[in-house]
Image (cartoon, rainbow, N blue to C red):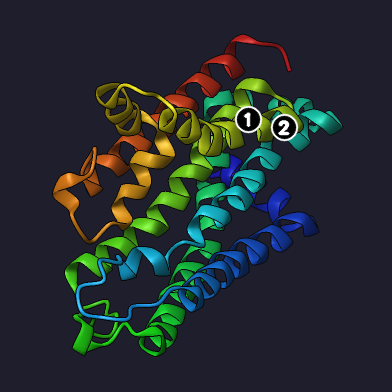
Amino acid sequence: MTALHAEWTKLRTVAGPYWLVATAAVLTAGLSAATAAAVTCAAAGCGVDAPRITLTGVQLGQAVVAVLAVMVVGDEYRTGMIRTTLAAMPSRSAVLAAKGVVVAGATLVAAVPGVLGAWLAGRLILPGRGFTAAHGYPPLSLTDGATFRAVAGSVLYLTLVALLSLGLAAAVRDAPTGVGVVLGVLYLAPILASIVTDPDWERRLRQLTPSTAGLSVQHTLDVASLPIGPWPGLGVLALWSAGALLLGGLLLRLRDA
């Protein structure tokens, strides 16, 4: 509890995290609203995955929560405060665990309103873009199992991205490098997978890429044709996050501050 209280105090006493939390929420909802306003459904069976379109902003919000998580570790190494932290709390595993709890909590504060705002924007905007019951699209509702899974899964996705980023930041110990590594994993890896010419290898890479696999939780149409199912895909991201935290924790214990 001492480590958790210390990490929470450090996070809330600087302005940067507040701005990042607010920015993540606004960008997630804002890009989703803009995307919903840009699509149309002119006839029945237009084949657009409405909940997934509504949650497009998650792909931008993830960059902000990644930066937030990297800063929690990277800034301490930059300022040298990590020495004070580890002197006050010798158990380095406890320090990283406390940082993980604080980062997950801060991410939820951004993800819940951001994702719910995206869903609400889609519910309000999409009917005016042709996504009506006559075209096979009833209003988006959280009582629909697939829509609820996409919304709740998006919140979990952002939280797991933050934990993945925290673990990688603990491993590299430098904020700019950490941000570069995380953004490469999130955005560059799917691009590399898409240019693979062998369809079998492309499918395998999409099953293993953390962002592509994790975002499968947003799909509500043609789920059977996905490289990996919604919940198994989120499980892949969870394994990446756990692996990054284990790596970061191991290196934190083995190296000097």
Q: Residue furthest front?
A: 43
Q: In this figure, which residue is indicated by the disc labeled 2?
A: 85
Q: Quadrant of residue 228?
A: top left
> What distance separates the C-alpha of mark 1 from that of mark 2?
16 Å
Element on which disc 1 rests:
helix
Q: Where does residue 132 sit, x and y in percent of width and height?
A: 27, 87
Please provide percent x and percent y for residue 38.
Answer: 50, 74
Number of marks in picture: 2
Q: What residue is shown at x 54% (from left), y 51% (from top)?
A: 62
Quarter placement of the C terminus: top right
Q: Residue type at mark 2: give it.
A: Thr
For this view, does 23 lie left or right of residue 188? right
Q: Quadrant of residue 136?
A: bottom left
Q: Residue at x 60, y 44 (%)?
A: 66
Who comes first in sequence, dot 1 or dot 2?
2
Disc nearest the viewer among 1 and 2: 1
Please state the horizontal and vertical placement of residue 208, each as a whole percent of the image: 34, 29
Q: What residue did someone put label 1 on? A: 169
Image-based side of 50 in relation to 19, left or right: left
Give the numbered dot on residue 240: none
Seen from the viewer's position, the closer of residues 76 and 155 is 155
> In the rendered structure, which amino acid carries the disc numbered 1?
Ala
Query: Can the viewer see residue 193?
Result: yes
